[in-house]
Structures are given as structure tokens and as C-alpha cells.
Image (cartoon, rainbow, N blue to C red):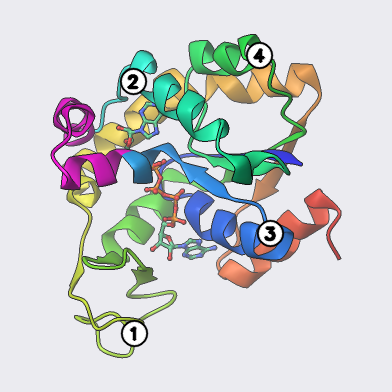
């Protein structure tokens, strides 16, 4: 099954993608994570992307479509995959079609802007292994250290309040249009984001027909 996890920044796409891929044994592909890794390694793509990401803007379509094209040819994608954060513009959605890729379902996570601002102010990531935490909804034992590897926990650069505001603006002006696009195609399923991660997961599993 090829799944798109769609939603505003901080809606819980990455959180749910990790849970679904564990359950269905398919890879989760996050364009945001690939770009952050490229930044960490100071690759040409990373250096280009940083300027956009730090401001809360979208990275150019040509850059992210190249990432997707390369990743989807890997053998582990043969049995299906989850796209987390791609597509985010109409040209990106059309690019998937041009590649002959069939998306089976688009799960759209709905969370209010107010809730997102709260969630992202509480998010921390492990500097070493990338494990995500929420200081409020899934806190680590020690608020400064990763439970899994002991690495330092840091806030994401683009989780600063002014960048979150810009990311939300970008979502509403450039990405939200895809909701109507996929609704018209008939593959959109909307999921109301719940206060508890496990309650959102129950709705996601129900939408995917997983018991
Ligand atoms: P990306 O990394 O994809 O960021 P995003 O879409 O803004 O999404 P986030 O990763 O911030 O949030 P999420 O929805 O995954 O939520 P999470 O599960 O972490 O992209 C970053 C940047 O890269 C973009 O701004 C853009 O510049 C660029 N980019 C990426 N893809 C691109 C593309 N296709 N085109 C162009 N540019 C692109 O959850 C958030 C927090 O909430 C966590 O702390 C979590 O623990 C908590 N949480 C999750 N679920 C719940 C719940 N139910 N209740 C309470 N807390 C919860």
C-alpha cells in the first residue's frame, strides 16, 4: 500500500508514520528528514535547502522531487511506503502521477493552528539518533537527555515561534490546496488529531483498515 501522510507542520505525520511503518513493515520517507540530514552533512542540497527551511519556506519542487525519485527506486519501496510530508504543492502531486505512481490513500491529519503552536514549542529531538520527544505529551525521563542513546535533546531550528508562524502560513497558502485535489480524486481520508497520540493512531488504523 502506498500512503501519503498529509497535514500541517506538527500535525503528527512523523509520529504516526513511525507507528504505521512498524505495523505494516514498509518504509517511511520524510522529505524533511532527508533535507535535515543533507544540512547536517553540508551537502550542496543541504546548503541550498537550509536557507528555505530556516525561514519556514518550502524547498523548491525540483529539489524535493529529485529526492523522492531517487528514494522510491530503492528495493525496500517495492512492497509499498509512506510518504511523510510529500507532496506539498500541486506540481509535486502531479509529479507523482507523471512518474506513474499510484497513491492508495491520503491520510489528512487535522489539527488547529493553536494546538500546533503548543505542540511544536514542546518538541525536542535527540541530536545523535534523532528520536523525537514532546516535553508535554511524551516526555523523556530526563528532559535534557535521550532515553534511547543518552544524546542531548534540542529544539528543532524551525520550531522557533516566528518560524512556526511562517510554516503555518506556507501550509495554508501552498499546501492545503491538496486536500481538495485528493478529495476530488477520491482517495482522501481525514483524521481529526486527538490529544493522545494513541487515540490518533486508533483513527489512523481504522482508516487504513488495520485491526
Ligand atoms: P518536515 O520535517 O516535514 O516538517 P513539517 O511538515 O513541518 O512537519 P513536522 O516534522 O514539524 O511535524 P509532524 O507533522 O511530522 O509532527 P510530529 O509527528 O513530529 O519539513 C521541514 C521543512 O522541510 C519544511 O518546512 C520545508 O521547508 C522542507 N520540506 C519538507 N518536505 C518538503 C516538500 N515536500 N516540499 C518542499 N519543502 C519541503 O509531531 C510534532 C510534535 O507533536 C512532537 O513533539 C510529537 O511528540 C507531538 N505529537 C504528535 N502527535 C500528537 C498528539 N496526538 N497529541 C499530542 N502531541 C502529539
Between 130 and 56, the one nearer to me in the picture: 130
Question: Could you tell me how far apart the alpha carbons at marks 3 and 1 are, in whole angstroms?
Answer: 24 Å
Question: Could you tell me how far apart the alpha carbons at marks 1 and 4 are, in whole angstroms?
Answer: 41 Å
Q: Nearer the viewer, mark 3 or mark 4?
A: 3
Quarter in which the C terminus is drawn: bottom right
Identify the secondary structure beneath mark 3.
loop
Query: To which residue does mark 3 refer?
Result: 25
Residue 108 at least partly seen: no
* Vertical position of residue 53 compared to residue 184: above or below: below
Q: How crowded is mark 1: few (under 14 residues within 10 Å), some or many (20 or more)?
A: some
- Horizontal side, residue 94 vs residue 144: left or right: right
* Vertical position of residue 152 compared to residue 53: above or below: below
State the image quarter where residue 97 is shown.
Answer: top right
Residue extending farthest to the bottom is 141
Query: To which residue does mark 4 refer?
Result: 97
Q: Which of marks 2 and 3 is nearer the N terminus?
A: 3
Q: Does the residue labelled 1 lie within 8 Å of ligand 1?
A: no
Q: Does the residue labelled 2 lie within 8 Å of ligand 1?
A: yes
Query: To which residue does mark 1 refer?
Result: 147
Between 9 and 125, the one nearer to me in the picture: 125
- Give the magenta-colored segment's residue range: 35-55
* Vertical position of residue 12 compared to residue 169: above or below: below
Instruction: Identify the residue shown where x is 49% and y is 46%.
Output: 112
Q: Which of marks 1 and 2 is in front?
A: 2
Residue 17 at least partly seen: yes
Amino acid at each position: 500500500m502506498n500512503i501519503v501522510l498529509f497535514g500541517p507542520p506538527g500535525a503528527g505525520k512523523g509520529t504516526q508514520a513511525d507507528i504505521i511503518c512498524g505495523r505494516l513493515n514498509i518504509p517511511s520517507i520524510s522529505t524533511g528528514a532527508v533535507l535535515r540530514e543533507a544540512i547536517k552533512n553540508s551537502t550542496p542540497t543541504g546548503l541550498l535547502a537550509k536557507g528555505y527551511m530556516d525561514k519556514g519556506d518550502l524547498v523548491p519542487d525540483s529539489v524535493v522531487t529529485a529526492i523522492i525519485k531517487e528514494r522510491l527506486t530503492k528495493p525496500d519501496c517495492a512492497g509499498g511506503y509512506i510518504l511523510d510530508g510529500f507532496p506539498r504543492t500541486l506540481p509535486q502531486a502531479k509529479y507523482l502521477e507523471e512518474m506513474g505512481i499510484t497513491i492508495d490513500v491520503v491520510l489528512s491529519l487535522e489539527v488547529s493552528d493553536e494546538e500546533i503552536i503548543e505542540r511544536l514549542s514542546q518538541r525536542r529531538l535527540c541530536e545523535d539518533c534523532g528520536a523525537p520527544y514532546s516535553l508535554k505529551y511524551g516526555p523523556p525521563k530526563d528532559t535534557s537527555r535521550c532515553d534511547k542513546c543518552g544524546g542531548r535533546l534540542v529544539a528543532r531550528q524551525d520550531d522557533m515561534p516566528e518560524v512556526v508562524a511562517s510554516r503555518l502560513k506556507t501550509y495554508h497558502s501552498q499546501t492545503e490546496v491538496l486536500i481538495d485535489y485528493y478529495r476530488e480524486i477520491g482517495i482522501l481520508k481525514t483524521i481529526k488529531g486527538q490529544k493522545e497520540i494513541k487515540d490518533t493512531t486508533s483513527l489512523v488504523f481504522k482508516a487504513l483498515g488495520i485491526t
